[in-house]
Image (cartoon, helix red, strand yellow):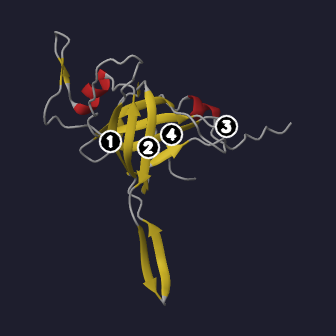
Amino acid sequence: MAAAVKKAPKITYGLKNLHYAVMEIAEDGTVSYGSVKSFPGAVKISLSPDGEIFEFRADDGVYYECDGSDGYTGDLEVALVPDEFKIDVFGWEKDSDGLLHEVSGAPHKHIALMGQMATDAVAKRVVFYDVFCGRPNLEYETKQKTMNVLTQKMSLTCRPIESNGKNYVKSSTTPEASEDKYNNFFKAVKLPEAAA
């Protein structure tokens, strides 16, 4: 009996299962990642391509062109940035009295950012390998007659990372992804393997 052909998605309409893992760079430049942690409360990720198309003209026309892909820039909107994320990524400190302190000048860590988008077929899972997050915006207002939820936004810069001689910005599952790869996607950050 032939295996069932998995349907390719035509639309995407949701966002959930946001996760992150702190990037660690060894002295020799080798990249690894810490444990993957959940980041609840995802509302929206909005990213625009970064980089220009390079053209070289010869013979009275475009002789060579390439996409100077430098990744993406944009925003992540969430219900509330978790304290654990602020400590892991922004270098904030929690003292023995349970107070959380924002430390001026603390170095921000780069992360891998992972998430899941609902589609009309199997949900797509995505990882961005090198993400730098700006501090979240702060907004407070008095309580109104109707509840007005105030979300938080962080700027994102997603850059390529080198693996096996190539620069990768992100990876995502496809309908052909093995069940093992799909089910274990959020357990660890795996850099792309060399092509066969």
Q: Secondary structure at mark 1?
A: strand
From the viewer's perspective, is the residue at label 3 or at label 4 nearer? 3
Pointer 3 local density, CA inside 10 Å: few below 14, some 14–19, many at least 20: few
Residue 145 found in image quarter: top left
**Badge 3 vs badge 4, beta-carbon distance below 8 Å:** no
Amino acid bearing label 2: Ser
Q: Find disc 2 in the rendering and name its residue.
A: 46
Amino acid bearing label 1: Ser
The tag earlier along the polypeptide, 3 or 1, is 3
Q: Secondary structure at mark 2?
A: strand
Q: Up-down: is 97 above or below 32?
A: above
Q: Find disc 4 in the rendering and name its residue.
A: 126
Residue 113, given in percent of the width and then of the height, sits at: 41, 37
Looking at the picture, tell me which residue is in the foreground, 104 or 87. 104
The tag earlier along the polypeptide, 3 or 4, is 3
The residue positioned 16% from the left and 10% from the top of the image is 96
The residue positioned 33% from the left and 26% from the top of the image is 81
Q: Find disc 3 in the rendering and name its residue.
A: 120
